[in-house]
Image (spheres, grey):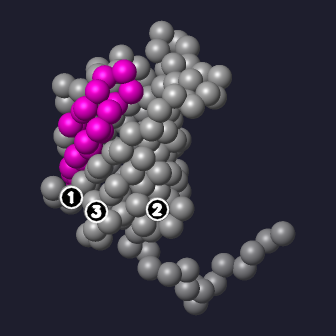
């Protein structure tokens, strides 16, 4: 099938800004499962995300109980280059890519958990986000996590 492309067709605003959908205050719950899918625990996660400038955003995550670590207060400045982003601090190294305007994938090397973290962020709607996490340690699945967030403050 061939679609006719006409300059009069309106596909909406062309001013999509990658990562803008992350901005705001979020409250979430992180559910942790072992490699065989057995539920281990759940813990609250609080998140504040905002732009520092046109190319850099700040991610503040507070985990009430990061699995096998305890409370964790992590601040990350993340630089955006088109659909790609990256950042690093003493706790984590982050690389991410926008796959679609509301689906993002991240690879995180965590010094806190000693794992490589593969995250798939899916925005169910503008104020609800689900993260599917696969944590790998020494080349093997360590745990899986599902995090569900609700945006409580709009940018």
Q: Which residue is mark 2?
A: 128
| Residue 151 position by quadrant | bottom left
Say which element carries label 2: strand
Query: What span is in magenta?
Result: 55-74
Q: Is residue 122 magenta?
A: no
Residue 56 is inside the magenta segment:
yes
Give the camera-side residue of 56 and 76. Answer: 76
Residue 97 in sight from this viewpoint: no
- The residue beneath circle 3 is 24
Q: Position of residue 107 (x, y in %)?
A: 43, 33
Mark 2 and mark 3 in contact (Cβ < 8 Å)? no
Circle 1 SS class: strand
* Other residues around mark 1 within 10 Å, as few (<14) / some (14–19) / many (≥20): some
What residue sits right under mark 1 in the picture? 51
Rendered view: 49 above or below 37: below
Can residue 81 be seen from the camera position used here? Answer: yes
Task: Give neighbour class at mark 3: few <14, some 14-19, many 20+ (Cα, 10 Å).
Answer: some
Q: What quarter of the picture does the C terminus occupy?
A: bottom left
In the image: residue 80, left or right of residue 107: left
Give the residue drawn at x 38%, y 73%. Answer: 15
> Looking at the rendering, which quadrant does residue 25 occupy?
bottom left
* Gap between marks 2 and 1 measured at Cα: 19 Å
- The picture places residue 11, in percent across and down from the top left corner, at 55, 80
Q: Earlier in the sequence, mark 3 or mark 2?
A: 3
**Please, which residue is most extreme toward the bottom here?**
8
Q: CA distance from mark 3 to mark 2?
A: 12 Å
Does residue 73 appear to the left or right of 126 in the view shown? left
Above or below for 18 versus 94: below
């Amino acid at each position: 099938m061939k679609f006719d492309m006409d300059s009069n067709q309106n596909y909406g605003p062309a001013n999509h800004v990658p990562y803008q959908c992350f901005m705001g205050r979020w409250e979430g719950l992180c559910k942790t499962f072992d490699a065989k899918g057995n539920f281990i625990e759940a813990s609250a996660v609080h998140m504040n995300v905002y732009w520092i400038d046109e190319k850099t955003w700040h991610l503040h995550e507070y985990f009430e109980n990061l699995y096998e670590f305890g409370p964790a207060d992590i601040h990350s400045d993340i630089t955006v280059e088109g659909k790609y982003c990256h950042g690093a601090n003493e706790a984590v190294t982050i690389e991410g890519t926008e796959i679609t305007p509301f689906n993002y994938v991240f690879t995180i090397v965590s010094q806190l958990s000693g794992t490589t973290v593969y995250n798939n962020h899916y925005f169910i709607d503008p104020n609800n986000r689900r993260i599917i996490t696969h944590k790998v340690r020494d080349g093997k699945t360590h745990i899986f996590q599902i995090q569900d967030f609700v945006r409580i403050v709009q940018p």
